[in-house]
Image: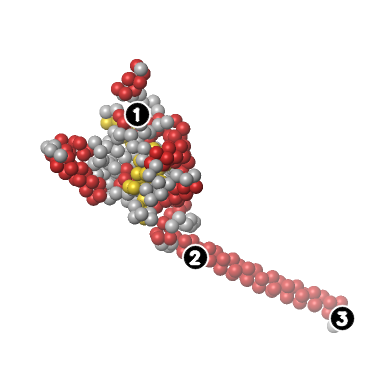
């Protein structure tokens, strides 16, 4: 074979070898890509199957449920009125739920609670902000203590029964005793304590008996942690409850800051937010203030 023909044969063989090699590499890459895709699918499936216990601890996972929740936007609550009292529908925003004698807790509403050192329970979602608030207060030599928190329906019924029996023992008839008890104790299903979002906070008597120092610090600072004074002085006609400097309610930091800034109670704030054009007649107390 001539030198020229041998060179041409070598080129052809080299070309064939290179072509075969390229095809082999392509097949290998294609196979690896399929394996990676399968692994990603496996990871998503594993994430979706995460137990509820793990999710409840606040860990975030990219799951189908998470994506679905992030895309859903709560509906705007509907606002109606029972006389001059606002009635706000529950739209799923748990921290903004209005509960009073005109707004009952939604049927089937459930919460997860955590137990504090003294045995009281609160909604687990407010625990971190509550702990931070107490830590910061103690750093200022103010010593708050949770004296009342979550109550079950049975607890609320028991408290109502206790007050009725107390008034009957004092000589009142049953009907009058019931009316008097309802002035101090919310009917079961209408108490914020059943939400786990409401707290009665007084001084820790193991350290201090200065309730006023606790009330003063909370009045100035609680909103920073998402809590509001739920029953302010002068708002009794709106809230239906007498002034209680110890009763705080969690509504989230954004709501709390606006409520504190504007000097509103929760009912007034929700009306302003969701039905700003509604006009109400001034209460007797407001008329007296204006006349004085």
Q: Position of residue 266 (x, y in %)?
A: 37, 35
Q: Earlier in the sequence, mark 3 or mark 2?
A: 3
- Element carrying mark 1: loop
Q: How many numbered callouts?
A: 3
Residue found at the very far bottom of the displayed protein: 1
Tell me the element at label 3: loop
Q: Residues within 10 Å of mark 3 (few under 14, many from 20)?
A: few
The residue that label 2 is drawn on is 42
Name the spot of residue 258 as percent of width and height, x first.
46, 34
Q: Nearer the viewer, residue 74 or 242?
A: 242
* Tag in front: 1 or 3: 1
Q: Is residue 76 above or below residue 125?
A: above
Dividing the picture into quarters, in which one does residue 190 lie?
Answer: top left
**In front: 187, or 51?**
187
Residue where numbered disc 1 is placed: 234
Mark with earlier residue (1, 2): 2
**Residue 225 % position (x, y):** 46, 43
Q: Which corner quadrant holds the C terminus?
A: top left
The residues tagged by marks 1 and 2 sit, at their Cα atoms, a distance apart of 60 Å
10 Å neighbourhood of mark 1: few (<14), some, or many (≥20)? Answer: few
Q: Quadrant of the N terminus?
A: bottom right
Q: Which of the labelled discs sits on residue 2, or is there none?
A: 3
Residues at marks 1 and 3, CA–CA distance in whole angstroms: 114 Å
Looking at the image, which residue is at 36% across and 26% down?
278
Residue furthest to the right in view is 3
Q: What is the secondary structure assignment of the residue under circle 2?
A: helix
Q: Position of residue 119 (x, y in %)?
A: 34, 55
């Amino acid at each position: 074979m001539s030198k020229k023909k041998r060179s041409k044969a070598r080129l052809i063989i080299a070309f064939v070898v290179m072509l075969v090699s390229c095809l082999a590499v392509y097949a290998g890459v294609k196979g690896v890509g399929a394996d990676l895709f399968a692994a990603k699918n496996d990871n998503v499936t594993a994430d979706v199957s995460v137990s509820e216990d793990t999710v409840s601890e606040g860990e975030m996972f990219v799951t189908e449920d998470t994506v679905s929740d992030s895309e859903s936007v709560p509906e705007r609550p509907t606002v109606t009125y029972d006389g001059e009292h606002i009635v706000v529908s529950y739209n799923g925003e748990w921290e903004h739920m209005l509960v009073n004698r005109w707004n009952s807790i939604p049927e089937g509403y459930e919460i997860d609670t955590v137990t504090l050192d003294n045995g009281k329970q609160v909604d687990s979602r407010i625990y971190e902000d509550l702990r931070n608030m107490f830590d910061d207060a103690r750093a200022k030599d103010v010593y708050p203590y949770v004296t009342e928190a979550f109550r079950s329906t049975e607890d609320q019924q028991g408290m109502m029964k206790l007050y009725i029996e107390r008034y009957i023992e004092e000589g009142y008839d049953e009907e009058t005793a019931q009316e008097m008890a309802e002035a101090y104790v919310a009917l079961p299903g209408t108490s914020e304590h059943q939400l786990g979002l409401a707290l009665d906070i007084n001084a820790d008597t193991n350290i201090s008996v200065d309730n006023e120092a606790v009330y003063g610090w909370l009045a100035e600072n609680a909103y920073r942690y998402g809590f509001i004074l739920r029953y302010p002085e002068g708002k009794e006609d709106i809230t239906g409850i007498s002034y209680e400097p110890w009763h705080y309610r969690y509504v989230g930091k954004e709501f709390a800051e606006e409520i504190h800034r504007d000097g509103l109670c929760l009912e007034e704030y929700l009306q302003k937010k969701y039905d700003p054009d509604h006009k109400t007649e001034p209460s007797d107390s407001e008329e007296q203030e204006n006349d004085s």
